[in-house]
Amino acid sequence: MNENMNQRPLPSSRKRALVGFAVVCVVLLAALGLGSDYMLRYALRPSMEHSHDLSWRFHNIIDENPQLRPWADSLQRHHALRDTFVTMPTGERHHATYILAPRPTDRVALLVHGYEDNGMGMMHIASIYHHMGFNLLLPDLHAHGRSEGEAVQMGWLDRLDVMRWMEVANSRFGHDGSTRMVLHGVSMGAATVMCVSGETLPSYVKCFVEDCGYTSAWDEFEGELHDRFGLPAFPLLHACSALCRVRYGWSFDEASPLRQVARCHKPMLFIHGDRDTFVPFSMLARLYAAKPQPKAQWVSPGSIHARSFHDHPDVYAAHVRAFVGQYISLSDSLR
């Protein structure tokens, strides 16, 4: 009797406060859920207006770099750009363009494009290696170009796809069972190449070139969230990363080229424009410090994001030739 008398009902004002608090929590959680879904779609499922049009991108990259036109015209006259497809372990069908070297060789350059691009976006880089006497393989990353896929993978799961393309290239271009291969990527392609570099790799991979890659997907998205929307990382980026893990099987913090290059003992050349704000120039110092020797870097003066070749094509090519030539002989003879 006394117990029941002691259990007084909550004052109506306190009840209203608790109900109001619960409603606010539900509204905030719903807003966070909707916001993280929107931001994840915005980041990983962009419009891709030109990503799937290989012909447009081919002509666009040549228009931007008119000094390449005689070489590109020659490729087209000789029908040198050829398609190949491979089925990934996920069951998706991925596409790549390959170009044979001017003369038979076991040298191979595997060139990896950036965000919302396709393999043809690497034709300016392809010109360097083709003139060095390399076979070329230019894959379309997951959900780009003619490759199947639902969403951008920011280089992380892409590393597994590129490793499959490495096997394809080694089989297609190899002499006596093996090639001598360099991997070169720009922007998200550079992040992909760096993510590959931290894996256990076959001996035929000799070196890497990364051009303006980011330290991690988390760092890149945190910067974009601040610059484009004026928002802090917490809580939206945390919610987006968790949703990405549930929906696509990876999280922003695990997609870390910075951690991967720290595990890489093969040679790597780092390139970055000193006016890059999209992938901040400051990321170069962190990446370069994390990478064990052997390594080298070239800072492109005055270049914004992914424009180092465009601004300094001859110097860019010279740095690539000098670095790669240390690890892959440029003589015409096979090994």
Image (tube, rainbow, N blue to C red):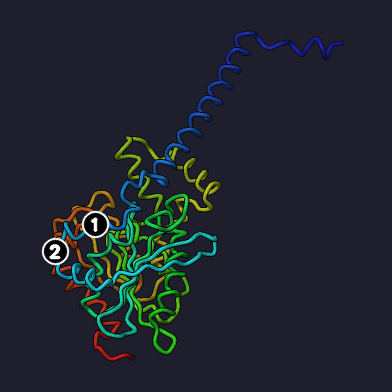
Please give the name of the residue rendered at 47% of the width and 42% of the height, measured from the top-left corner: 240
Q: Quadrant of the C terminus?
A: bottom left
In this image, 222 relative to 312: left or right? right
Would you identify the image quadrant in which residue 216 lies? bottom left
- Mark 2 belongs to which amino acid? His
Q: Quadrant of the N terminus?
A: top right
Q: CA distance from mark 2 to mark 1?
A: 12 Å
Please give the name of the residue rendered at 82% of the width and 12% of the height, measured from the top-left corner: 4
Residue 119, percent across and down?
A: 32, 62
Residue 117, percent across and down?
A: 32, 55
Label 2 sits on residue: 312
Residue 276, percent across and down?
A: 22, 52
Query: Could you tell me which secondary element the residue under label 1 belongs to?
Result: loop
Query: Could you tell me which secondary element the residue under label 2 belongs to?
Result: loop
Please give the name of the residue rendered at 25% of the width and 65% of the height, measured from the top-left corner: 123
In this image, 3 relative to 307: left or right? right
Would you identify the image quadrant in which residue 112 lies? bottom left
Q: How many marks?
A: 2
**Compared to 131, does 104 lie above or below?**
below
Label 1 sits on residue: 306
Would you identify the image quadrant in which residue 172 lies? bottom left
Front position in the image: 257 or 10: 257
- Mark 1 belongs to which amino acid? Ala
Residue 12, percent across and down?
A: 63, 8
The answer to the question of whether label 2 and label 1 lie on touching residues, with beta carbons closer than 8 A, is no
**Compared to 76, does 50 lie above or below?**
above
Which of the marked residues, 2 or 1, is nearer the chain's N terminus? Answer: 1
Please give the name of the residue rendered at 28% of the width and 79% of the height, measured from the top-left corner: 101
* Residue density around tag 1, few if under 14, some if 14–19, many if 20 or more, within 10 Å: many
Q: Is residue 285 visible?
A: no
Front position in the image: 162 or 84: 84
* Residue density around tag 2, few if under 14, some if 14–19, many if 20 or more, within 10 Å: some
